Amino acid sequence: MLKLTLNEPQRDAVMAGLRLLQRALDLGEVAPNDGNVGDILTCSGRHEGMTSDQIDSFIENTLNS
């Protein structure tokens, strides 16, 4: 498990990036193992990428607390 300490602007930037990723997944612009951002999402296939719903839960339960 990774633990990060973020200041408010950093947290907001991470949250904005995750919302952009969530939107791109919903629109089909990013897919797991797509040879681009989707490879980052899955660490080049080492694990499943998070779904849009999982990203939403992560933001709500972790970054908004």
Image (cartoon, rainbow, N blue to C red):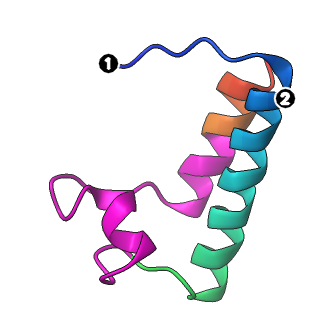
**Residue at the image point whose x is 60% and y is 11% from the top:** 5
Q: Quick one: label 2, few (<14), some, or many (20+) residues within 10 Å?
A: few
Looking at the picture, which amino acid does disc 2 mark? Pro
Looking at the image, residue 2 lies above or below residue 26 = above
**Residue at the image point whose x is 78% and y is 50% from the top:** 16
**Residue at the image point whose x is 66% and y is 24% from the top:** 62
* Residue 30 located left or right of residue 19: left
Mark whose residue sits in front, 1 or 2: 2
* Residue 62 located left or right of residue 31: right
On the image, the x and y values in percent for residue 28 come to 56, 88
Looking at the image, residue 35 lies above or below residue 11 = below
> Which label was assigned to residue 36?
none
Residue sitting farthest toward the left: 46
Q: What stretch is highlighted in magenta?
A: 32-57
The residue where tag 2 is placed is 9
**Residue at the image point whose x is 49% and y is 60% from the top:** 51
* Quadrant in the rendering for residue 3: top left
The residue where tag 1 is placed is 1
Looking at the picture, which amino acid does disc 1 mark? Met
Q: Is residue 38 magenta?
A: yes
> From the image, which quarter does the N terminus lie in?
top left
> From the image, which quarter does the C terminus lie in?
top right
